[in-house]
Amino acid sequence: MRRRRSADAAASDAVAVAGVVQRLAVLLQAGIAPTAAWRHLGGAGDTTADAVCERLDAGGSASSALTDRGGAWQQIGVAWQVATVVGAPLAVSLRGLAEALRDAHQARDDVRSALAEPQTTARLIAWLPLVALGLGAALGFDPFAALATPLGAVCLFAGGLLMFGAYRWTRALVARAQPGEEIPGLDAEVIAIALSGGVSIPRALEVVAAASGLEPTPETESVLALSRSAGAPAVELLRADAAARRQAARTEGRLRAASLSGRLLLPLGVCTLPAFLLLGVGPMFLSVLTTTPLTL
């Protein structure tokens, strides 16, 4: 649950950051200087812009202020530093990265929406053994007295253990199906920003590594090799590859969510149904045996 709250907070943060960066890009594209643009945003009530302005007034840089904010702002700070070092257009660079943040958030949101139904079903089924116990009491049996017997205590312990096992197993399956927090194709986006400043590919890789520690993935290296061999502009190839990776991550996430419904049948069959028999049917059967007099 804590991990889910953290993921939701990170997703909300990414959306808010993308909105602020889009407004900043519009101001920059209108010809407003970066420092003045930050001050305009700060005057509009943006706390991050206020922090950047304070850092600038103290003689620091906007990129360091953004990086210190953490979360999605850290990626914006890296893009800002890379664009500043190579002389890339800030407005275009920030707009492209904001769109990447929005795409990544949309992909995670789609996957979480697809996961909602199997997660809800799993939670409802997990209560089935206890519902059966209450139903037995409602039908006039005395399952709680039966659970106080030695055999009933064994049923209670085994059923509780199976319910706990089903809970942990289900939770692990759902956690594996959750989307990650990373932005697919981020290295390609940042390298494209560096190359848009007109530097060579080796220089772009050097600047990106110094700013963020990011190393090109094999997919990005393949795109750069294609650019060299074909003489095609690497910037557009990298951005197209990053967009394709985000789309692939979205599709993969939906497939994981779809397969989760089938995988949740495993803890249901192995743990929940036996727990239902032990906590629901077993106590009723014991109640019948203990209340029915034996006749010769």
Image: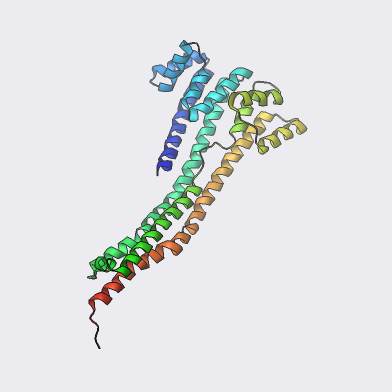
Which corner quadrant holds the N terminus?
top left
Q: Residue furthest front?
A: 150
Q: Is residue 105 left or right of residue 207?
A: left
Q: Residue furthest right?
A: 229
Q: Is residue 126 left or right of residue 64?
A: left
> From the viewer's perspective, is residue 78 above or below residue 55?
below
Q: Is residue 280 left or right of residue 102?
A: left
**Image quadrant of residue 46?**
top left
Residue 59 location, x and y as percent?
50, 11
Residue occupying the point 49% across, 54% down: 260
> From the viewer's perspective, is residue 38 above or below residue 246?
above
Q: Residue furthest bottom?
A: 296
> From the viewer's perspective, is residue 200 above or below residue 136?
above
Residue 183 location, x and y as percent?
55, 36
Colour option used: rainbow
Residue occupying the point 61% across, 32% down: 187
Residue in front for this viewpoint, 228 or 293: 293
Residue in front for this viewpoint, 171 or 89: 171
Residue in front for this viewpoint, 264 or 142: 142
Residue 211 location, x and y as percent?
59, 24
The reply to whether residue 232 is in sight is yes
The reply to whether residue 26 is in sight is no
Residue occupying the point 40% across, 66% down: 274
> From the viewer's perspective, is residue 186 above or below residue 200?
below
Residue 268 location, x and y as percent?
43, 61
Residue in front for this viewpoint, 47 or 158: 158
Which corner quadrant holds the C terminus?
bottom left
